[in-house]
Amino acid sequence: MEDITVPMSLLVELKLGPSLYCYLYTIKKGVPFECVEPSVRRNMDTYLQQNGWVVLLPNAPRLTPKAEDMLADAANKLPKPNVKAPASYTLVNDWINDWRELWPAKQKSGGRRVRGDKQGVTKKMIAFLSIYPKTTKEEIFEATKQYLHEKRQVDWKMISCADYFISKNGTSLLAGAVEEVLENGTNYTESSGADSVWFTSA
């Protein structure tokens, strides 16, 4: 059975106990209410019918319009969970410039600016998120900062360009970096200055 969030302020106003609310909720969802003994549930049925919440039918109780309206009102009043949205649920264009600015502005690799061009980087990031839809924007930024921190320690030797970091020839350094950070965390230190909006400690 799923967890049920109880809107206590509304129940106090309605003088309806949490157990009765949960019972009404399970009736609406069409799932068994197995939290009480059958004799107790019969008493709950009687109380709810007397107070206009249900109509008792031969097979199962049915919610009244009053109960349907109350449950809808309760759903609207419950706080929405603060879930970190995957990056694929946000517009890449909203943050891709911030991500590119993590990369050193003057550094080149193979004659190319490591930041890459916005259009190419955006296209590859959108493709990346279609393959890894659960990856969050925060994870992408943390993994990128850790990668750049490590490259700065060796004077940017063998640094990948931003677009190649996302993917190249079917391989994604970014995916590997995200996995590494999720498993082991980061050790970079944010500061200001240098040729980027942040730089790593030596």
Image: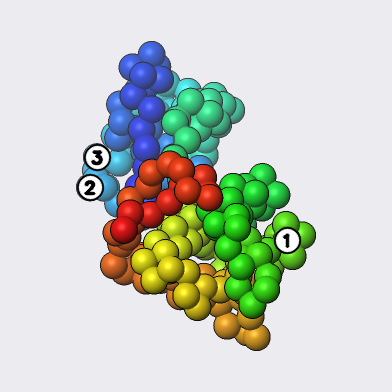
- For the residue pair 168 and 48, the one nearer the viewer reads as 168
Q: Residue tagged by mark 3?
A: 40
Residue at the spot x=38%, y=54% of the render? 200
Q: CA distance from mark 3 to mark 1?
A: 68 Å
Q: Nearer the viewer, residue 79 or 50?
A: 79
Q: Is residue 37 above or below residue 187?
A: above
Q: Which residue occupies the foreground of this view, 81 or 113?
A: 113
The kind of residue on which mark 3 rests is Val
> Is label 3 or label 1 in front?
1
Q: Is residue 165 left or right of residue 127?
A: left
Crowdedness near tag 2: few (<14), some (14–19) or many (≥20) residues, C-alpha within 10 Å: few
Kind of residue at badge 2: Glu
Q: Residue furthest bottom?
A: 169
Q: CA distance from mark 1 to mark 2?
A: 66 Å
Say which residue appears at 60% left-offset and 73% top-offset.
109
- The answer to whether residue 187 shows anywhere in this view is yes
Residue at x 51%, y 45% (from the top left corner): 197
Residue marked by disc 1: 117
Where residue 23 sits: x, y (%)? Answer: 37, 39
The residue carrying mark 2 is 37
SS for dot 2: loop
Amino acid type at circle 1 is Asp
Q: Earlier in the sequence, mark 3 or mark 1?
A: 3
Instruction: Report the residue at 47% width, 69% height from top.
Output: 156
Q: Are marks 2 and 3 in contact (CB under 8 Å)?
A: yes
